[in-house]
Image (cartoon, rainbow, N blue to C red):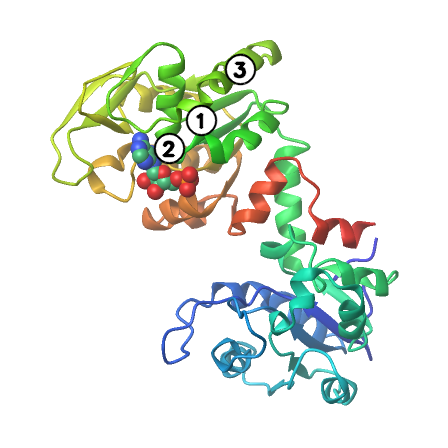
Amino acid sequence: MQTIENYDFSGKKALIRVDFNVPLDENFVITDDTRMTAALPTIRQVIENGGAAIIMSHLGRPKKGPEDKFSMRHLVAHLSELLGGIEVKIAPDCIGEATKNMADALNAGEVLVLENLRFHPEEEGGDAEFAKQLAQNGDCWINDAFGTAHRAHASTAVIAQYFPNDKLFGYLVDSEVKSLDKVLKAPKRPFTAIMGGSKVSSKITIIENLLNSVDNLIIGGGMTYTFMKAQGGKIGGSLCEDDFLGLALEILKKAEQKGVKIILAVDIVEADDFAETANTRIVPSNNISDGWSGLDVGPDTIAIFKKVISESNTILWNGPVGVFEMEKFANGTKAIGDAIVEATSKGAFSLVGGGDSVAAVNKFGIADKMSYISTAGGAMLEYLEGRVLPGIAAVLD
Ligand code: AMP
């Protein structure tokens, strides 16, 4: 297979789909450039190997065609700085004659940013004619936008048909796919998944898919109480999705049939208020007081979770096991993070993904001690659900 490592870029214009959907303040200053820095290795690989880079992305959610506040021009100066000061040009549009002329005139080592793809509704519509016009700007297509890989948009998937022999993953997508596959397709056992967060409903498909591959499934966070109530427990005012009680029991049954160990909390920190100032008590997870809610896991549970994690060789973590945003209810989530760090230092492969768990590891300052952090929320979750991502399939087909 052609890869960004072995592809010959000399004399080629590489169309690189990146995710430069960065936050900007009211003065159009970029407040977090993580997504830009993440794509730099791919851009550098092209321009340092004789190619020219044509960058395409969406920015924000323009609804009515071109709008200056969503213009890619706001990113050009910073991209130039990130690339060590080389000139970065900006095209008037992402398709059309004037843009194509600028693309055609690019020399090796030069960089051109196309205007916001979503100024054209055809981008999200996955329009083939629009994709063809985009394709005319380059000689090869690189998908380095994992964050939009679950969308069959013109620039993320449909465009691939115009580059049957010249389509590649960028470094970022390549490492996301490899890391996720390491966990999902060939995990070193025991494989433990820790699923937290607030709702069963948003995690149910992932949990069902993971039952096919994990040895242990730790379920924490707000989901706990739907499982407790389903089994006849008392949950007080804790978060619960009554529509999912049946499904919770089904999951427990399925896990048993598949030989997957489900580990739920045995004790809970219950609180009389959803606040840092609340009164708290440790109670059994199936006996929460009326008017109180479970907001974190208790010490016995932490000990059980830690033991399972320490014996694992592959660890996937999605979602906090308590309301970690408040110091008072952060202990469980912090303990999980520390246990994963320790297991990782002893050779386990750990993958952390999904907005809130990434926020948690950043908050606790342990992000660099995990094997891999996936920052691509929706796309990662769909991959974990076992779905085929159009942006990945388009390159592989
Ligand atoms: P999610 O987006 O579904 O991953 O949920 C993440 C959110 O779940 C975080 O903001 C946590 O504060 C919240 N959460 C975790 N545990 C609980 C709990 N026991 N009760 C209510 N919210 C929780």
Which numbered dot is residue 336?
A: 2
Determine the CA span between mark 1 and mark 2: 8 Å
Total tally of numbered discs in the picture: 3
Res 327 quadrant in image: top left
Q: As drawn, is 37 to the left or to the right of 328?
A: right
Between the residue at mark 2 and the residue at mark 3, the CA separation in whole angstroms equals 26 Å
Q: Residues within 10 Å of mark 1 (few under 14, many from 20)?
A: many
Find residue 309 and name its label: 1
In terms of image quarters, where does ligand 1 lie?
top left
Whether residue 190 sits left or right of residue 109 in the image: it is left
Judging by the rendered image, the residue that carries numbered circle 3 is: 250
Classify mark 2 as within 8 Å of ligand 1 or not, answering yes or no. Answer: no
- Local packing at callout 3 (Cα closer than 10 Å; few below 14, some 14-19, many 20+) is few
On the image, the x and y values in percent for residue 212 come to 63, 23
Mark before the other along the chain sequence, 1 or 3: 3
Q: Please, what is the three-letter code of the amino acid marked with disc 3?
A: Glu
The label shown at residue 37 is none
**Of callouts 2 and 3, the N-terminal one:** 3
The residue drawn where x is 23% and y is 27% is 293
Instruction: Give, as a three-letter code, the residue at label 2.
Output: Ile
Question: Horizontal and vertical percent for residue 188?
Answer: 62, 28
Amino acid type, mark 1: Ile
Q: Is residue 12 visible?
A: yes
Q: Residues within 10 Å of mark 2 (few under 14, many from 20)?
A: many
The reply to whether callout 1 and callout 2 are in contact (CB within 8 Å) is yes
